[in-house]
Image (cartoon, helix red, strand yellow):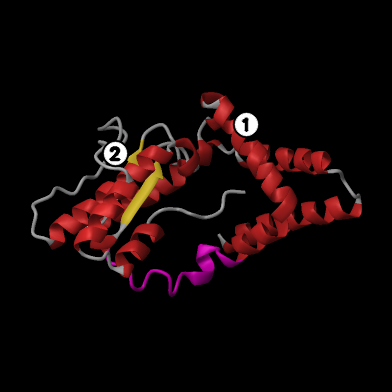
Amino acid sequence: RMEKDDELSRRIEANCNRACLFRNTQSENRLMWTDFLDTWYGIPSLWGNFELDQPTLYRHMISKRSSSLAGRGRDIAAVLRQGSPSRHSTSDWKSTKPSGTLFVAGSLDVKYSKIGQAWSDLDNEMTYVEIPNAGHGLLVQAPEQVSDVIGNFLSERQGKRKGIKVTTRKTRSSKASGPVKKKSTAEAMRETSKTSPILIDDIVSTVRGINLKPST
């Protein structure tokens, strides 16, 4: 994994160098990055058929990320290289508690949905939620569902601390059409802030359970 992340970082940096050497215009830079991103987001095992299923949203995302890479390509390459999970495999997960871990994956993300299900099978205290008809780009493809999943997860944990009976939900695409909407994340955070503080390890466990690796 680390070698693959390093290779992708080098490709991003090479594009940055090419843009500097040939003094490309801003529009030429965006076009160069568009080709790069189309190749990356064209991997079916990660992204499903994002471009075909949601063409308007896909082109909007490509446009925004092309502009971002044109202006901050080197920064993104550095984050990708330093944030590679393999570089932190001996330390990142030591403090993680299964009961405080939320793992969210899209059903079309073959790799991470398998990982999430395998972890859930190993320890049933971990909460695994699978978003139907979404791939690796959850925060682009299904932002409201992800927000609801996190909000519900935090609300349920707060309910357990106060002794309220709750049911931990594990959603799989083959058994459900999606998470039941209860409260937005903002509403859940406001509610919990009025009662008792959310422990830092809960937030860390929640964030680590979601793949937030920059999508380049």
**Residue 173 in picture, x, y percent from top left:** 32, 34
In the image, farthest residue toward the front: 194
Q: Would residue 91 be counted in the magenta stretch?
A: yes
Would residue 138 appear left or right of 174 to someone viewing this image?
right
Circle 2 crowding by C-alpha within 10 Å: few under 14, some 14–19, many from 20? many
- Counting residues from the N terminus, which is met first, the one under dot 1 or under dot 2? 1
* Three-letter amino acid code at the position of disc 2: Arg
Q: Quadrant of the N terminus?
A: bottom right
Q: Which residue is denoted by mark 1 in the rendering?
A: 59
Query: Total of numbered circles in the picture?
Result: 2
- At x 31%, y 45%, the residue is 149
Which span of residues is magenta-colored?
Answer: 82-97
Pinpoint residue 206: horizontal percent, then vertical percent.
34, 58
Neighbour class for label 1 at 10 Å: few (<14), some, many (≥20)? some
Indicate left or right for 158 with 10 as reference.
Answer: left
Tell me, yes or no, if residue 21 can be seen here: yes
- Residue 174 lies, in percent from the top left, at 29, 32
**Front residue (pair 79, 47):** 79
Q: In this view, does 47 lie above or below 177?
A: below
In the rendered structure, the answer to whether residue 212 lies left or right of residue 172 reads right
Q: At x 44% / y 74%, what residue is drawn?
A: 90
Residue ID for mark 2:
172
> What residue is rendered at 51% in x and 41% in y?
46
Q: Overall secondary structure of the magenta stretch?
A: loop
Q: Locate residue 209: give its quadrant.
A: bottom left
Q: Tell me whether circle 1 and circle 2 mark residues in contact (CB < 8 Å).
A: no
Question: 193 or 150, which lies in front?
Answer: 193
Q: In this view, does 160 lie to the left or right of 206?
A: left
Q: Is 47 a magenta residue?
A: no
Q: What residue type is labelled 1?
A: Arg
Secondary structure found at label 1: helix
| Quarter occupied by residue 55 | top right
